[in-house]
């Protein structure tokens, strides 16, 4: 009897180990021609975030306790891509940073799906070519082109070694990429020609009529997640034009009431977070209505942060203090800068749009030299990018006061202003009180005129 019990105990122990073995991903590889020492990984919604260390030889190895199967975004320096992960995968990847996208190759369990993904990306690059010329064709020609591309992707998928389950998902991903490209035609065409092309009747019907309850696609497909947002923009705008009494909150309440996927539901509801703004005279009454549509504590906390940010950053309220490292040495607090109007620019070394604003910011600093305006740039880089910040500030030579937020977006100053997207410009008066929590960017046409009006106290509306 004792032997039987012992055997059962051993069996249960082995079974438990086998179960636990599948509860993570083993992720390893080598990256050639790089000085980077970190791989940044994140999933949709940022509920999973991980920094994987790269050694001096370019090797890395880590155990990833992922939230669930799906597409995970990873970034190495300025290069980024996605990897499909499932618990139980044992993936090894080799990358040449000098040819990042075409050189990526996977081996091990899960490699078939990820190598197919790389091959599809390479094929897409060949078929699309220059994005400007791709979209600058008549709409009939464009529709034929994207249909032909879709068929090429389906052929690649058919010839792959993927399982039936993986093939079914990838087929949906191809369809969603087709729909998103179709949707983007007007946007890109207009960007280059400054005119909206004439579209055939019912052009957007496939996006209007898309399935909004496909959680599998939501977890695995960035195009699908974008389409959920674009569907909201299309249908909400049309509904409110048809019924002027309908509000955005009314529309979303009706749209999500039958959705079973909490993740998709909250993605749609999150579009209402922008209602937490002084521009919305009903923001206080909208807040509890939006809150009632949310299920997870994380999203409720985000909404509350936006609501509190609006209440705490109204014009003429004292701005929260900060005390950040100054590039020139020592620390600088908000109280140290009182006596002048402060134009605060929040940025990061990895933020392309931020860097694009630098020439305009440099010119503003020159234009207002010896006037009562202080220009303060605050970096929200992580500690891993600290040396990049130290190096980039003198390279760009923008001028003004250059500070480093020690806790990035989690610092009290950033949380108070609900800073999420950057660049972000904030204006404070001589006493550290808020003029506006969203000032015009340095490159905006009216920025110089607006700052002049502040100096003369003949303030013009933004």
Image (cartoon, rainbow, N blue to C red):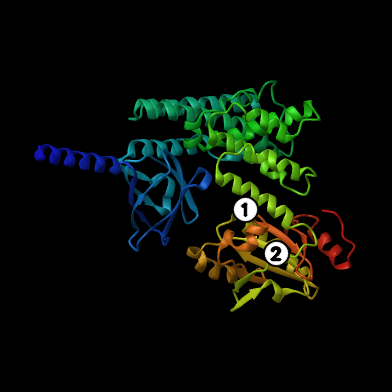
Q: Quadrant of the N terminus?
A: top left
Does residue 240 appear left or right of residue 41 in this picture?
right
Q: Are marks 2 and 1 in contact (CB under 8 Å)?
A: no
Q: In which quarter of the image is residue 240?
A: top right
Give the residue drawn at x 63%, y 24%: 140
Q: In which quarter of the image is residue 368?
A: bottom right
Is 162 in front, or is 123? 162
Give the residue drawn at x 70%, y 64%: 344
**Residue labelled with disc 2:** 344
- Name the element at disc 2: strand
Camera-side mark, 2 or 1: 1
Does residue 397 appear left or right of residue 452 in this picture?
left
**Residue labelled with disc 1:** 420
Is 202 in front, or is 408? 408
Extreme residue toward the front, this view? 1
Going from N to C along the chain, the mark reached first, 2 or 1, is: 2
Give residue 138's position: percent from left, percent from top.
Answer: 66, 28
- Label 2 to label 1, Cα distance in Å? 15 Å
The answer to whether one can see residue 192 in this image is no
Give residue 437's position: percent from left, percent from top.
Answer: 73, 57
- Is residue 371 placed above or below 274 in the rendered structure? below
Give residue 441's position: percent from left, percent from top.
Answer: 72, 57
Query: Tag 2: Cα neighbours inside 10 Å, few (<14), some, or many (≥20)?
Result: some
- Is residue 156 placed above or below 67 in the rendered structure? above
């Amino acid at each position: 009897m004792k032997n039987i019990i012992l055997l059962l105990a051993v069996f249960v122990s082995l079974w438990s180990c086998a179960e636990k073995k599948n509860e993570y991903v083993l992720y390893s590889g080598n990256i050639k021609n790089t000085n980077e020492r970190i791989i940044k990984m994140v999933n949709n919604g940022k509920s999973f975030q991980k920094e994987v260390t790269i050694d001096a030889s370019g090797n890395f190895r880590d155990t990833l306790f992922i939230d669930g199967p799906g597409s995970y975004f990873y970034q190495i320096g300025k290069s980024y891509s996605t990897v499909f992960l499932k618990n139980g995968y044992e993936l090894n990847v080799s990358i040449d940073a000098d040819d990042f996208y075409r050189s990526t190759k996977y081996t091990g369990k899960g490699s078939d799906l990820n190598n197919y993904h790389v091959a599809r990306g390479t094929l897409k690059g060949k078929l699309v070519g220059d994005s400007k010329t791709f979209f600058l064709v008549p709409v009939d020609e464009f529709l034929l082109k994207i249909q032909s591309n879709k068929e090429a992707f389906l052929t690649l998928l058919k010839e792959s070694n993927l399982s039936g389950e993986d093939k079914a998902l990838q087929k949906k991903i191809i369809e969603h990429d087709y729909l998103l490209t179709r949707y983007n035609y007007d946007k890109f065409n207009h960007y280059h020609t400054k005119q909206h092309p004439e579209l055939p009747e019912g052009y957007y019907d496939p996006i209007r009529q898309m399935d909004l309850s496909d959680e599998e696609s939501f977890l695995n497909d960035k195009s699908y997640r974008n389409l959920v947002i674009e569907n909201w923009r299309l249908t909400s705008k049309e509904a409110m034009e048809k019924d002027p009494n309908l509000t955005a909150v009314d529309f979303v309440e009706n749209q999500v009431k039958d959705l079973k996927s909490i993740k998709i539901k909250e993605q749609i509801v999150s579009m209402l977070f922008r209602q937490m703004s002084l521009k919305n005279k009903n923001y206080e009454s909208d807040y509890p209505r939006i809150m009632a549509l949310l299920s997870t504590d994380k999203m409720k906390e985000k909404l509350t942060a936006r609501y509190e940010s609006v209440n705490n950053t109204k014009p003429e309220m004292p701005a929260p203090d900060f005390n950040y490292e100054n590039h020139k040495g020592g620390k600088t607090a908000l109280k140290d800068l009182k006596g002048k109007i402060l134009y605060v620019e929040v940025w990061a070394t990895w933020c392309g749009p931020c860097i694009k604003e630098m020439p305009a910011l440099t010119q503003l600093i020159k234009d207002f030299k010896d006037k009562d305006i202080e220009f303060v740039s605050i970096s929200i880089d992580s500690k891993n990018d600290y040396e990049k910040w130290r190096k980039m500030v003198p390279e760009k030579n923008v001028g003004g006061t250059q500070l480093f937020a020690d806790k990035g977006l989690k610092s009290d100053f950033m949380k108070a202003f609900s800073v999420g997207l950057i660049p972000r410009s904030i204006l404070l008066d001589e006493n550290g009180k808020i003029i506006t929590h969203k000032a015009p960017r340095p490159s905006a046409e009216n920025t110089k005129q607006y700052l002049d009006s502040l100096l003369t106290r003949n303030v013009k509306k933004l």
